[in-house]
Amino acid sequence: MNLLVNKIIAYINLNKGEEDKAKVLVNVKSNISFRGSNLWILACAIVVASVGLNVNSTAVIIGAMLISPLMGPIIGAGFGLGIYDFQLLKRSLKNLLVATIVGLVVSTIYFYISPFKETQPELLSRTSPNIYDIIIAFSGGLVGAIAITRVEKGNPIPGVAIATALMPPLCTAGYGVATGNFRFFFGAMYLYSINCIFICISTFFIVKFLSYPIKKQVDEKMQKKVKYFISTLLIIFIIPSIYFAYQLFEEKKYKQQITVFTDREFVNKGMTIVYQKTQFNKNPKILELGFLSKRFSDAEIKKLNKSLKDYELDNTKLIIKQDTTDLKSDILNEINFNKSALSQKDITILSLKKQIKENYFENSELLAEMKILFPNIDNISISNHVFNENTDSLKVVPVLVYKSKKDIEKAEKRKMILWLQQRLSKKQIEVYRQN
């Protein structure tokens, strides 16, 4: 048993292949500064990343992340926290601030002078962080810190630069400033802050795990002050990070329950949802839905609101958009706001849905209503038919064919046509009896 435990420990032992700690610290400190060549490399990387985001090129964005030196001061801050080196921490945070300001200024200038200001999907994806961004940042930070402490650095560092993606959200924040879209700015800076904090914290854990020696201060009193200060700063870092993680986890869980609710209550019952918007940060939370053809009574909407609790959607209000004018306006606003996130395929789907709505008739619902007004009607079938007005033009007219034991009178038929025109919002309708 002891032999098995020893083998497992040998497999997971991080001390094996570890670089000399003093040498690692020298390398970490040398990569912190943003002066001279490092500053030029950063500015060029920002421009490359901004162009990639502007033209929606993933390959260009990846290239920018590979040449970016942004990881240096973040790793340095993690080491400074881990070994209680106040000077190292101060230098790291100062240089990270310089790098962030340079990144924002360069990307803002680029997007301000760029003639193309469409919100591409690559830009849009950097404005809404989720729980996976935290997992990636923390795991990527662990890999980066481990790789830095190895004799053989291997291939992890480029992968970490790509996975943690510090550059794109910083450029997206610059885009937000340049276009005056502060929702983009704050969303991107939120993602950038999450990445920085979790990479720093994961580095701190690796430094502690590998038992890097704590820096001794000449003055014992000063040493205690530095320890207290860094411990306080670490707590200030960790508490928001736990809060970020919890909030993003709750939002992800909530959206999953929304999907379950809409699938079971609507999609699986053959109803087509053409508009959906969730406002997670409202109190109560808001879920807005719009449907292709289905209309709900007040009693049905009330019942659906009550059923939200069955799906763990507490403190949520369901609003169903039924006014076609308002619904059309909301859909257009949503498309205009996120138009770059919609591919041509999405736009085609919306167009087809609109065509289906215009050409689809609920025969069963219509028959039920007609039987009340015209009791002699046994069955109906209604659909659009194309008529040739002349050689150059076509006209689409709804044609209703009804089945009855005896033909209805002319006045009754005229009444039926007028009612159908009003009911279906059509100017012309043809009505025939099935022989």
Image (tube, grey):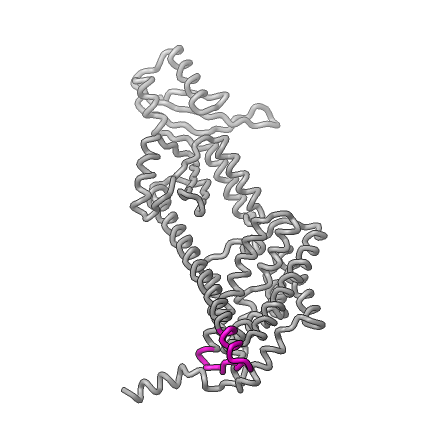
**Position of residue 62 in the picture relative to residue 270 (left or right):** right
Residue 225 falls within the magenta-colored stretch: yes
Which residue is farthest bottom?
Answer: 3
Residue at (63%, 68%) from the top-left corner?
Answer: 95
Residue at (51%, 68%) from the top-left corner?
Answer: 199
Q: Is residue 375 above or below residue 120?
A: above
Q: Horizontal and vertical percent for residue 354?
A: 49, 36
Answer whether residue 65 is visible to the viewer in this image.
yes
Disc count in the image?
A: 0
Residue in the foreground of this view, choosing between 24 and 221: 221
Residue in the foreground of this view, choosing between 293 and 128: 128
Q: Horizontal and vertical percent for residue 189?
A: 56, 57
Q: Horizontal and vertical percent for residue 258?
A: 38, 47
Q: In this view, does 71 lie above or below 375?
A: below
Q: In this view, does 398 lie above or below 200?
A: above
In what quadrant of the picture does the N terminus appear? bottom left
Corner quadrant of residue 63: bottom right
Q: Horizontal and vertical percent for residue 400?
A: 41, 24
**Position of residue 304 in the picture relative to residue 387 (left or right):** left
Magenta range: 208-227
Residue at (54%, 38%) from the top-left corner?
Answer: 332
In what quadrant of the picture does the C terminus appear? top left
Residue in the foreground of this view, choosing between 295 and 390: 295
Corner quadrant of residue 132: bottom left
**Position of residue 388 in the picture relative to residue 356 (left or right):** right
Answer whether residue 140 is visible to the viewer in this image.
no
Which residue is farthest left?
Answer: 1
